[in-house]
Image (tube, rainbow, N blue to C red):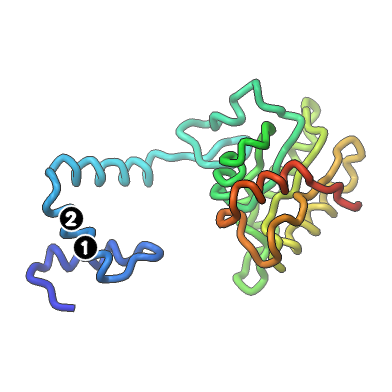
Amino acid sequence: MDFPSKLIENAVVELSRLPGIGKKTALRLALHLLKAESDTTANLAEALAKMRFDITYCRTCHSISDSEECTICANQLRDHAQVCVVADVRDVIAIENTGQYKGVYHVLGGVISPIEGIGPADLQVDSLVARAAAEDSEIREIILAISPTMEGDTTAFYLSRRLRDFENIHLSTIARGIPMGGELEYADEITLGRSIVERQRQAR
């Protein structure tokens, strides 16, 4: 693809690095920004820079946050006795959109995947165990809400083994309303909401 300007070419190259954005779409976006008010482009650039460099992670659940503690963990109206374990922050967003869950979360930061070189030590597993073992812990139920893929099932099995000695904590998994091989972020809200409501007790 030939470009009339090196600056346009650079913008297209960077935009096309985004998932799902090809060169033609990137060019259309770049030309749109070029024609837009200068404040529009400046505001977009500022918002992206702030997102990248100012966002932090919650010290408790490891979800993305604007401060040391995310709004969900800081909300005393949430049920802190119920912890929903997910692989990624996108899963938190998906479950929150159902309006069916009122507890708190724990974000692992991925799933166990030997092929990709990701083991338990690369995930926020130890901090989950520490939350469960803390003297002031309110946790009475841990819900394993991990996508039902081979890697997800491996991760859920590993977590159930790590958490089985906490006799005062019930382990449950979301009901399999989510198809095998599916990803939580792509599930419709009704199916995902039903999966949360009809979660199943996890065998020890």
Q: Is residue 174 left or right of residue 18?
A: right
> Considering depth in this image, is 133 or 80 the residue closer to the camera?
80
Location of mark 1 (residue): 28
Q: Secondary structure at mark 2?
A: helix
- Image quarter for residue 177? bottom right
> Mark 2 = which residue?
32
The residue drawn where x is 64% and y is 63% is: 182
Residue drawn at the location 13% of the way across and 63% of the way down = 7
For mark 1, does the 10 Å Cα neighbourhood hold few (<14), some (14 to 19), or many (20 or more) residues?
A: few
Asked whether 8 or 57 is in front, the reply is 8
Residue 91 located left or right of residue 15? right
Q: Position of residue 121 (x, y in %)?
A: 68, 57
Q: Are marks 1 and 2 in contact (CB under 8 Å)?
A: yes
> Which x, y percent locates residue 2?
14, 77
Residue type indicated by callout 1: Arg
Please name the amino acid that badge 2 sits on: His
Q: Residue at x 69, y 33 (%)?
A: 103
Q: Position of residue 120 (x, y in %)?
A: 70, 58
User: Is residue 201 positioned above or below 99 on the image?
Assistant: below
Q: Residue furthest toward the left?
A: 4
Q: Is residue 177 above or below residue 78?
A: below
